[in-house]
């Protein structure tokens, strides 16, 4: 009875973490459909192996690790097969937004995708999803010092990609553009 209750509680916690899983999946997949597929695969594996989850550890980190491993397994698998249209074809079929903020968001998105994957992953895990350094280290399977180093390099490289050098002074004003807010993160 207690085991069933614990399993049901863990299942409910997994459901509550779906928005975070979707956000993390977008770090790996540029198309929403692919991100949703990755979330679904992660949930299927997690729920099928819920008995292997160690109580007392962070479920979110466990799920993120499953997702990351699933993504890399799929990448290796896709490397052996070449089917369908090129991944970037959707970029040719879209119309750019006219609002300045939309343009800035798109600039940041493109710059983010030009970062090396391990830098982009750290930036999204820590800055966008609010993960702790310790959890990011556990998710990525690397030391915490590596996490901090990658995050620092990712921030600097992202600003370079956007054509902005990091400022030496602390100009923390509320509001501002997306680009200027990157310096504050």
Image: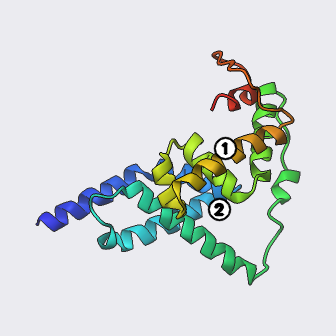
Which residue is found at the position 70% from the left and 58% from the top? Answer: 117
Q: Which mark is residue 152?
A: 1
Q: Position of residue 178 (x, y in %)?
A: 72, 29
Furthest toward the bottom, the residue is 80
Quadrant assignment for the C terminus: top right
Q: Is residue 67 left or right of residue 57?
A: right
Residue 24 numbered tag? none
**Color scheme of the displayed model:** rainbow
Location of residue 174 in the rendering, given as x and y in whole percent from the top left corner: 63, 16
Residue 123 visible in this rendered orientation of the protein: yes
Is 71 on the left or on the right of 178, as rendered? left
Tell me which residue sits at (63%, 74%) in the image.
74
| SS at circle 1 | helix
Marks counted in the figure total 2
> Which residue position is annotated with label 2?
34
Q: How crowded is the residue under tag 1: few (<14 C-alpha within 10 Å), some, or many (20+)?
A: some
Q: Classify 10 Å Cα crowding around label 2: few (below 14), some (14-19), many (20 and above).
A: some
SS state under label 2:
helix
Closest to the observer, 108 or 151: 151
Q: Residue furthest top?
A: 173
**Residue 20: x percent and y percent?**
49, 49
- Residue 32 in view (yes/no): no
- The residue at 61%/58% (across/down) is 35
Residue at image location 69% in from the left, 18% down from the top? 171
Query: Is residue 68 placed above or below 24 in the rendered structure?
Result: below
Position of 13 compared to 132: left or right?
Answer: left
Q: CA distance from mark 2 to mark 1?
A: 28 Å
């Amino acid at each position: 009875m207690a085991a069933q209750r614990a399993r049901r509680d863990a299942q409910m916690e997994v459901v509550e973490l779906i928005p975070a899983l979707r956000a993390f999946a977008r770090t790996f997949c540029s198309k929403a459909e692919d991100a949703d597929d990755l979330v679904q695969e992660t949930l299927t594996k997690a729920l099928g192996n819920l008995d292997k989850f160690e109580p007392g550890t962070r479920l979110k980190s466990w799920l993120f690790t499953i997702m990351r491993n699933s993504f890399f397994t799929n990448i290796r698998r896709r490397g052996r097969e070449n089917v369908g249209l090129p991944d970037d074809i959707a970029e040719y079929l879209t119309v750019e937004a006219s609002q300045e903020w939309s343009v800035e968001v798109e600039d940041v998105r493109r710059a983010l995708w030009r970062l090396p994957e391990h830098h982009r992953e750290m930036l999204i895990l820590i800055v966008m999803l609010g993960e702790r350094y310790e959890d990011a280290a556990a998710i990525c399977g690397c030391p915490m010092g590596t996490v901090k180093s990658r995050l620092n390099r990712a921030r600097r490289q992202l600003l370079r990609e956007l054509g902005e050098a990091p400022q030496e002074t602390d100009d923390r004003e509320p509001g501002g553009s997306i680009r200027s807010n990157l310096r504050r993160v």
